[in-house]
Structures are given as C-alpha cells and as structure tokens.
Image: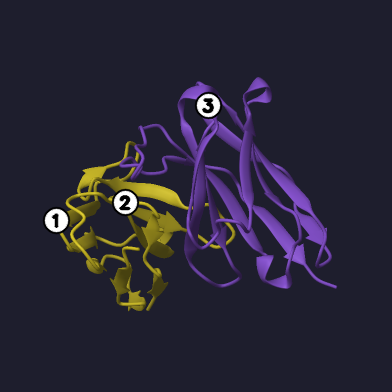
Chain colours: A yellow, B purple
Amino acid sequence: DIQMTQSPSSVSASVGDRVTITCRASQHISSWLAWYQQKPGKAPKLLIYAASSLQSGVPSRFSGSGFGTDFTLTISSLQPEDFATYYCQQADSFPITFGQGTRLEIK
Amino acid sequence: EVQLVQSGAEVKKPGESLKISCKGSGYTFTNNWIGWVRQMPGKGLEWMGIIYPGDSDTKYSPSFQGQVTISADKSISTAYLQWSSLKASDTAMYFCALTLGDCSSSTCYSPFEYWGQGILVTVSS
C-alpha cells in the first residue's frame, strides 16, 4: 500500500495568513493526488485534484502543487471558513489511501 | 443536481448484522463508481472499497476484504455496505462517495467529487 504522510499534523494561524500543508507519498504517484477539506460532522469536500487542478466552485486562494512523491496545498490568505481539517489522497493505485489529516486551527 | 443520500444513524449490538444504503440521483447511476469511506471517532479517512453498479465490479481495500460486503441495486440507484457480524470496533461514521471518472483494475484516477452526508454506526452492548 502507498503510505501518505502529511505535515504538520496541526497548525495554528490567523485570518489573512498564508498556510502551506505538505503531503509525502511513500512511492511515486505522478500527479494522482487530491486534497479535501472536512469540517466537524460534515462530509469531506474536494478542493484540488490531479495535484494542481482547482475543483469547480472552490475559491482561488486554494492551490496545489507537486509531482512524484512531494505535494503541497497552499491557502494564500486564510478566511474564517477555512479552519478545518485537510486530507490528501493518492489515486495512483489500489488501495486508495489518505493522509492522516492536518488540523488548521485559529490562533 | 448530483446527490448521494444515505440512510439514517444505526445503533446495534455486537454480533448483529447491518446493511446501510446510499441512494444516488442527478447522474447516470450505472455508469459511475461509488466508494465507501470509514471515519472512526476522532480519526482520519479510510477507503474501504468501490463498486461499479453497471456490472457490480467491486474492489476492496485489503484491510476490509472479508469484513464487509459492498453491493448495488441499479433498479433503485442504491449502493450498500453490509456486515454479517458487527464488532464494537465497527463504530464509526461511514460515507459513500462518487467518482465521475473511470476506474481500471488497478486504480480510480479521478477523485471523489460528491459525498453522502454520512451514517453514524454505533455498535455497543
């Protein structure tokens, strides 16, 4: 199985800050990576697919980059509604696997 | 509008059986893969498996193979996740999720664009 490791596990930031979350795959996955946002008690929401493609309707302050084994999700200017948990997910091979999550908290 | 509507919360005892459902609408149910994802209390997301309702082709995560059964009834556009004998460790939120892309024998390259609202399953004596 491909292991996905996110860092940091949690981060505190303020409205307006720029935040970057990293995801590392245990083997090469090309660009087959997605990012999701999850708020408490809710289903995950797709933000980014194919490493850097913005899902329709997602604000442009979210961006993704990376290829191979190292990927990043960047939020350029945090808004109050962005405080949530973020997960990466590899789609290179079965079983599909997720990172352990990064909790983004208000400072 | 694409929607996945899941059945309601369940409270069961260890050893009991359970079948939960996920009804799709707003798209061609038979032509798109639906997956199931587990989230244990306070934990992350775990992919359990995925089914193509058109021919019931099903892929399981090795972690869940033999522990659950994924099925679909295309006549009512509904996918299912079932257990024959629940354990306390099955207590979790279960989400169904739709990918509009294709899957091969080795992967689903497309992400999960749409999700159900989740079903909380509680197993306790």
- Give the chain of mark 2: A
Q: Which residue is mark 2?
A: A93
Q: Which residue is mark 1?
A: A67
Q: CA distance from mark 1 to mark 3?
A: 34 Å
Vertical placement of residue A84 versus B117, above or below: below
Mark 3: few/some/many CA within 10 Å (<14, 14-19, 20+): few
Tell if the residue under mark 1 belongs to the same chain as the one under mark 3.
Answer: no
SS category of the residue bearing label 2 = loop
User: Could you tell me which quadrant the N terminus of chain A lies in?
Assistant: bottom left
Q: Amino acid at mark 1?
A: Phe
Q: Residue at x 52, y 71 (%)?
A: B43
Q: Which residue is mark 3?
A: B55
Dividing the picture into quadrants, the one containing residue B122 is bottom right
- First in sequence: mark 2 vs mark 1: 1
As rendered, which of B119 and B48 lies closer to the eye? B48
Mark 2: few/some/many CA within 10 Å (<14, 14-19, 20+): some
| Residue B27 visible in this rendered orientation of the protein | no
Vertical placement of residue B87 versus B17, above or below: below
SS category of the residue bearing label 3 = loop
The residue lying furthest to the front in this view is B66
